[in-house]
Amino acid sequence: MVGDISHAILNQGWRDEGEFRFSPSGVESTGTAKCAQEFLRLLKGYVDPHLQHREKRDGHYEDFYAAATQIVQDEICEIVDPMLRDSAATIQAASRPLYEDQDANGYPNAFAKLAHSATLLIHWGVYHLLYPVTKPIGLGVLNAAANAVEQMEVFTVNHDVLVERQLQQGGIPFTDGFSDRVGDVLRFNWSWKEDTTVRLYKLHGSLDWYRFGFPGGIVQFAKVPMGCDPSTCKDGEGEELALLNQTPLFLTGTTGKERLYGVGFVGEFFIQFHSRLADYHTLICCGYGWADKGINNRVNQWLLNAPENRIVILHNNALDELKHKQFWSKRDRWTQFQQAGKIVVVPKWLSDCALNDLEPFFDN
């Protein structure tokens, strides 16, 4: 999926819908979308050789997003990176034809505006490519597990709404932080405190989260029903809500997103991640690539916090593939944790699991 999204963002046609909103066009990209796309292709030429040298792989959209974001943050002096000076200057010179005739429009310069438009093209590309994915496949064991336990915490880094739909199809009550109904939307209200079987935490945000201004001067994020236009959502009195951010809130980028884990709205979810893990001794993990250092550090600390803490990994490929992930190979964590009885590998994907594959690992 990462490769498909990367290819589409770099090669598919995109159109500019104003206010840095982009959508698929079905024809060759034009205008701001074309410039942003060509900038990403140029950026790929600088990113790929280093990743090939360090990690034996080409870059993907999250790498390009992180690189473009670094440029923007340095240009606007939000996070100044002296080590970026020479490479950013080279990229700026190479991309000059893409921005030299453009107005800066509130940015320090037109180059910063170009780099920012590239991040937004990625953001909207991810949105439009994931939005049509609405049918859960292979997630049925979540419902079976929910029916077999008194409490289940589900953490996901996916932006789609497939877990929610799977639980809804099975009639499983769950809370995800949003339950305050205000007209068309569900406002965030820390609903994890409600007494339900399943709590869901979307650590990297969601396709349906937007920031609104509500009556009474309240500014908060809310869930918008899929298929609804967030700019036309109304409150309980039929008045249009003030949409404060045109883009849905979800995190992208291989490194930059980690700076948000402890602060702001996203920080609320990581606070829960930390506190909920403390209540359990077993974490069942599936579909995770072990490349997110912010999450890896938290999982590593949790494994060290108590002798009985262990991680169960659902993995149906060669074990060496898993062991050689940087997180596990660094400082020989795999061997140390395995010898301590903290790693269990189930040679199945989640989609292949039945309840009896998971039940032996449920905390009592």
Image (tube, helix red, strand yellow):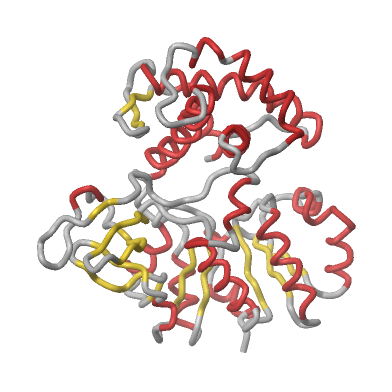
Q: Is residue 364 left or right of residue 6?
A: right
Determine the residue positioned at 43% across, 16% down: 102
Q: Is residue 48 shown above or below 319?
A: above
Q: Position of residue 22 (x, y in %)?
A: 36, 31
Q: Quarter-wise, where is residue 341 in the image? A: bottom right
Q: Quarter-wise, where is residue 252 in the image? A: top right
Q: Position of residue 144 (x, y in %)?
A: 46, 75
Q: Is residue 194 shown above or below 315?
A: below
Q: Quarter-wise, where is residue 182 in the image? A: bottom left
Q: Is residue 39 left or right of residue 12?
A: right
Determine the residue positioned at 72% across, 31% down: 84
Determine the residue positioned at 71% across, 24% down: 87
Q: Position of residue 7 (x, y in %)?
A: 52, 28
Determine the residue positioned at 14% across, 67% down: 236
Q: Position of residue 254 (x, y in %)?
A: 63, 44
Q: Is residue 131 shown above or below 55?
A: below
Q: Is residue 81 shown above or below 302?
A: above
Q: Nearer the viewer, residue 212 or 277?
A: 212
Q: Quadrant of the C terminus?
A: bottom right
